[in-house]
Amino acid sequence: MAVGGGTFGFSRNHQSLRHAEELALNDCGNPECRIVMTFANACAAYAHASNGVWGWAFRPDEQAARDRAMENCFAKGGHDCVVQTNRGYECDGL
């Protein structure tokens, strides 16, 4: 997962970590994007709020990852944190 400049990107199910990271950075699409985590056989989620706060997490299943990303976003001061449906989470190898 890559995050930066108010955007984020994922890639999943790649044999090479380097290739997966390159694709996540491309998906993020902002020169400020940096890899914040890698995951295998798990799900990752990204939550964001309108005040620019964000949170992310990875867990063994989608719902747990989404819940933890939301908790992290709210803990950082997000007021209206959301995980975008069909965009704000990915699962790898499950």
Image: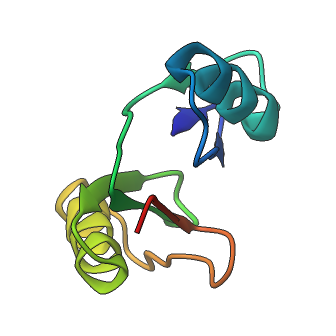
**Residue drawn at the location 35% of the way across and 42% of the way down:** 39
Q: Is residue 6 left or right of residue 69?
A: right
**Residue drawn at the location 76% of the way across and 16% of the way down:** 31
Position in image of residue 3 (x %, y %): 55, 35
In terms of image quadrants, where is residue 20? top right
**Residue at the farthest front position:** 15
Position in image of residue 4 (x %, y %): 59, 30
In terms of image quadrants, where is residue 63? bottom left
**Residue drawn at the location 67% of the way across and 20% of the way down:** 19
Position in image of residue 68 (x %, y %): 21, 69
From what the image shows, is residue 16 above or below residue 59? above
Which of the pair 66/55 is nearer the observer?
66
Please say which color scheme the image uses: rainbow
Which of the pair 28/50 is nearer the observer?
28
Which of the pair 74/14 is nearer the observer?
14
Quadrant position of the C terminus in the picture: bottom left
Q: Is residue 51 left or right of residue 58?
A: right
Q: Is residue 74 left or right of residue 80?
A: left
From what the image shows, is residue 23 above or below residue 27? above
Position in image of residue 29 (x %, y %): 82, 32
Q: Is residue 34 left or right of residue 77?
A: right
In terms of image quadrants, where is residue 2? top right
User: Can residue 33 be seen by looking at this rendering?
Assistant: no
From what the image shows, is residue 23 above or below residue 42? above
User: Can residue 76 be seen by looking at this rendering?
Assistant: yes
Q: How many marks?
A: 0
From what the image shows, is residue 19 above or below residue 37? above
**Residue drawn at the location 62% of the way across and 77% of the way down:** 84
